Amino acid sequence: MSTVSAQLALIEERVHAAQGKGGRLYWVLLACAIGATGIGAYSWSRIIRFGMGETGLNRPVAWGVLITDFVFWVGIAHSGTLISAILFLFRARFRTAVYRVAEAMTVFAVATAGLFPIIHLGRPWFGYWILPYPNERSLWINFRSPLVWDAFAISTYLVVSSLFLLSGLVPDAAALRDATSGWRRRLYAMVSLGWRGTDEEWRHHSRAYLFFAAFATPLVISVHSVVSWDFAVSVVPGWHSTLFPPYFVAGAILSGVAMVLTLLVPLRRALGIEELVTRRHLDLLSRLVLLTSLIVTFSYGMEFVLALWRGPRVELETLLFRAFGSYAPLFWTMVFCNCAAPLLLFFPRIRNTPIALFFLGIVVNVGMWLERFNIVVTSLSHNRIPFDWGTYRPSLVELGITLGSFGWFFTWFLVFLKLLPAVSIAELKEEVGHPHEGVDATEVAHAA
Amino acid sequence: MPLEGGRLGVFGDVSQAAEAVRALRSEGMEVRAATPAPFPELVAALERPISLIGLSTLTGAVAGGALGLLLAAGGSWAWPIVVGGMPIVSFPAFLVIVFEMAVLVGALTNFVGLLAICILGRKRRGVPFDPRFTRDRIGIFVPGGGIRAEQLLLQRGAEEVRDVA
């Protein structure tokens, strides 16, 4: 057997073996995730049975934790496309070992985010009213409304990111199909769509994948811009700002990449893929976290600068309420998590310590959830006149749904890890067949 | 359509496979390959033209954008209610719908085009199936290839050469 073919076989064995690993811990985590999903489902059922009074929403705060969760999960979904599509277009080869996890995360995060507008309706069976379709019931779709744009953007993002994930999985599923038996073989045969690896198939696949990346790149920027317009198009102080689209996109990338780090650090250990997902990959991802954290910090500052410089007085009032009012502890926790803590990533030692990156990822995501809470809630609770002031506290039902969303996301993610390859087999093999600077695939083979 | 006969060489090394492709092509033989990954060296040796799948993708994207515009403008005309003093057909606001629909339909046609081309290509330019070709070996197939093709494949390092009837 030649060296190259031995390396190719080894990569596949490694990835295949990783699916069988995890042991008891995997099943415990899956049980916890399903349990959390159950709590979320029960909480939602209370809203369906007893109405929106089960939430803490009331005048003047009509958007609370549920919309915060929506924006948070859309943000989480962004890193997958960034790592997969944008880095693909820029030929950043380090994406090879990490993009599959990020892509899967994207699909499950969008699927989670999409639930929240429906939950927030209170009467989810009317959710389809926002979709334009011929009807005789006098429904009027306002195409000038950002909420309608949102329905289009999120649906498109879910479809495109799912197709992107599936098209990347096809060659890997074919490899696993030919190496397994029983129900797994049937599953992989279905996902591989009859792939045989002929040069004709690769020729079209490579081109189609490039187009997916080309579509996904502007799409990822548009989706979070559209989400930001849900707020910015209104005239509510604290929301009505042209800064929102880039600010939201940078924040989404920050939270998404931080989530990738949080997932990858334990995963590479649990699945025994430390040679595939190396410390160098983690280092490069953490630099991305640092960069986007600096952009987000700049945006936080600019909000105040713009309000001080020429903004209406009420804008500054709202921002001061955010920083020093009843939600101040949450604001300063957010500043610590998103602006101060990531500065540790300037130190190479921190970037090379996986456990530190794991905890930093969690800290950043706590901060990013609080950022969305601050934007959504503080602006509504401190509108133009004192008559419109009020404090919102989330109810247990809303917190249960939030917990359930994490359970829902992790259930899908854990099932994915067990069934489909967590790293791209075909792209790692391509690196072996065409070694160049900075590629770790050959190291993988040698290490084993 | 059944696969035509020929010679199938199995390689364990990318460079040797690429060398075999170049040698076979220099003698005017048609060569097809099956590989676990799109190895650049082999792709270069095969010198295949760029895929035209982009045509279906582009058509889909343009059609999707037009559909989005039709939907937004038509829907607004069907219920001509003035909101915030904006025109009934408000192009800047509709651009979001046009863009999202262009991406959605473009991506769908891209995927359907990929499926269709691969299924058709499998019939027109197939390579005999061997599970090793998705794993760790490279298959070089010469349709209609005879003894000369077998010699070239073996000379360039093929681990085995099969006569495909």
Image (cartoon, coloured by chain):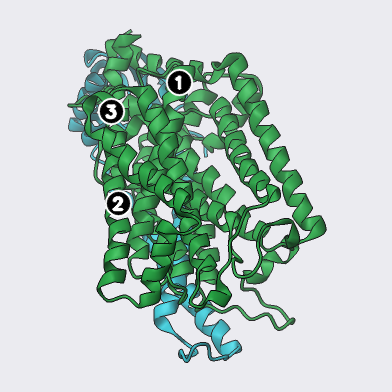
Chain colours: A green, B cyan
**Where is residue A269 shown, x and y percent of the image?**
44, 18
Foreground mark, 3 or 1? Answer: 3
Name the residue carrying label 1. Answer: A15
In the picture, the quarter occupied by the C terminus of chain A is: top left
Q: What amino acid is found at the position of numbered circle 1 in the picture?
A: Val
Taking the image as shown, residue B120 lies to the left or right of residue A403, namely left
Residue drawn at 23 percent across, 39 percent down: B47
Query: Which residue: 28% across, 70% down?
Result: A308
Instruction: Tell me, yes or no, if residue A271 can be seen here.
Output: no
Q: Residue B52: image x %, image y %?
A: 34, 54
Query: Which of pointers 1 and 2 lies earlier in the amino acid sequence?
Result: 1
Q: Earlier in the sequence, mark 3 or mark 1?
A: 1
Pointer 2: what residue?
A297
Is the N terminus of chain A in the top left, top right, bottom left or bottom right quadrant? top left
| Residue drawn where x is 46% and y is 89% of the image | B86
The image shows residue B110 at horizontal and vertical percentages of 44, 54
Q: Which residue is mark 3?
A: A351
